[in-house]
């Protein structure tokens, strides 16, 4: 018998092993479905919900500055006074105070009339206006969540009758949820309107109280020490806070000259914050509606998401680097202690 050489034998074994093995079949790789992102993203600026710049009503040297930047002020607080030849005399101050009192009385009457003629819905029974706003917001959020699965259904499908729908996918349930959402928005706006009317009356009464106090002090026949401060203030140029807030900017120093009509102090009500967009194009703005849910992130606070809703969509336009853009104001329902006026924000409008 012939002996097989080791090399030949090894080749034979490898050949047999190769013949006995089936080639490996590669498993098919599933390609994930790509879903188009319908989120609209815009950039904006953070602002307090209400602010104003105040000016002195006369030119002269600043005699007194009663607050500093960052201080809180109440409505009617005197922020600064001037020594000026343009300041009011006692007689002119008395005449002005009488006119202010008359105007304040009229504002109270008008505000009370509007509130008295406001039809408070029965659903608000037992609530204050603030409680009604909170309660209606809870119901609004629930209605929005209920309608969420149907939000991509066109308005055309929602208005079709059941007999007109071939697929049967859109049912009366979708229409019911849409109607519930519309009703929730109506009740929420009604609650806001009630709150605004009461706030207007409260502010009018506050102005009336200040006007009455000034009027009484100026006409005090005894010239008592209790009214001397008010008389002295109104007989000089001064600037007062028109509403409660903080002072983010104050450009007055004692002994310096201040010109009449020039903004010298800014008052900001930062109890609530808004974001105003700067680059929302005409292509995207048609897909934005009042009340739409929004998520906002500030560049300064990248890890913090702030929720809100679209408060208003401007009807006017501006131009930004050749694009036609529209300002959309977003009312934030979330806040963060680190928020500051003017911060850059990225706004995501959920579709």
Image (cartoon, rainbow, N blue to C red):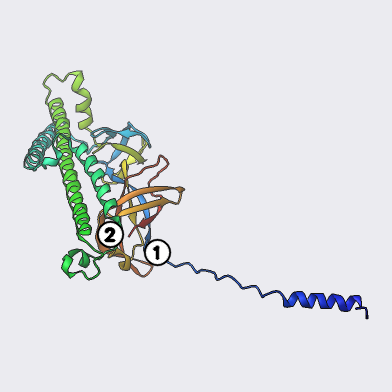
Give the residue pinned by disc 1: 37
Which residue reaches farthest front? 1
Q: Earlier in the sequence, mark 1 or mark 2?
A: 1
* Residue 24: image tag: none
**Relative to residue 154, is residue 300 depicted above or below?**
above
Considering the image in quadrants, where does the C terminus appear? Answer: bottom left
Q: Residue at x 92, y 78 (%)?
A: 5
What residue is at 24 percent from the left and 40 percent from the top?
Answer: 134
Q: Quadrant of residue 131?
A: top left
Tell me what residue is drawn at x 23 percent, y 30 percent. Answer: 233
Q: Quadrant of residue 40?
A: bottom left
Name the foreground residue: 250 vs 301: 301
Q: Position of residue 126 (x, y in %)?
A: 15, 34
Q: Which mark is residue 150?
A: 2
**Residues at marks 1 and 2 touching, judged by CB atoms closer than 8 Å:** no
Question: Percent position (x, y) of residue 72?
Answer: 33, 34
Percent position (x, y) of residue 78? Answer: 26, 33
Residue 36 visible in rendering: yes
């Amino acid at each position: 018998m012939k002996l097989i050489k080791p090399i030949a034998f090894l080749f034979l074994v490898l050949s047999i092993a190769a013949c006995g093995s089936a080639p490996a079949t590669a498993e098919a790789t599933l390609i994930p479905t790509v879903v188009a992102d319908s989120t609209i993203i815009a950039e904006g600026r953070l602002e307090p919900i209400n602010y104003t710049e105040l000016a002195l009503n006369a030119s002269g040297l600043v005699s007194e500055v009663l607050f500093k930047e960052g201080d809180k002020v109440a409505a009617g607080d005197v922020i600064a006074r001037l020594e000026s030849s343009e300041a009011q005399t006692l007689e002119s101050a008395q005449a002005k105070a009488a006119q202010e009192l008359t105007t304040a009385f009229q504002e109270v009457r008008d505000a009370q009339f509007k509130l008295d003629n406001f039809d408070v819905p029965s659903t608000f029974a037992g609530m204050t206006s603030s409680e009604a706003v909170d309660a209606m917001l809870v119901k609004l959020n629930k209605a929005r969540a209920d309608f969420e699965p149907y939000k991509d259904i066109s308005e055309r499908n929602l208005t079709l009758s059941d007999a007109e729908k071939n697929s049967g996918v859109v049912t009366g349930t979708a229409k019911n949820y849409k109607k519930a959402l519309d009703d929730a928005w109506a009740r929420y706006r009604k609650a806001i309107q009630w709150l605004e009317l009461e706030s207007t009356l409260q502010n009018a009464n506050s102005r009336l109280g200040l006007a009455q106090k000034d009027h009484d002090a100026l006409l005090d026949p005894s010239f008592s020490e209790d009214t001397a401060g008010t008389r002295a203030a109104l007989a000089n140029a001064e600037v007062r806070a028109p509403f409660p807030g903080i002072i983010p900017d104050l450009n007055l120093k004692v002994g310096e000259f201040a010109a009449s009509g020039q903004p010298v102090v800014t008052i900001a009500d930062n109890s609530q914050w808004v974001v105003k967009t700067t680059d929302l194009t005409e292509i995207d703005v048609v897909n934005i509606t009042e009340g739409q849910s929004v998520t906002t992130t500030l560049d300064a606070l990248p890890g913090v998401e702030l929720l809100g809703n679209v408060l208003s969509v401007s009807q006017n336009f501006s131009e930004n680097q050749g694009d036609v853009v529209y300002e959309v104001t977003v009312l934030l329902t979330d806040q963060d202690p680190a928020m500051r006026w003017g911060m850059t924000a990225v706004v995501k409008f959920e579709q």
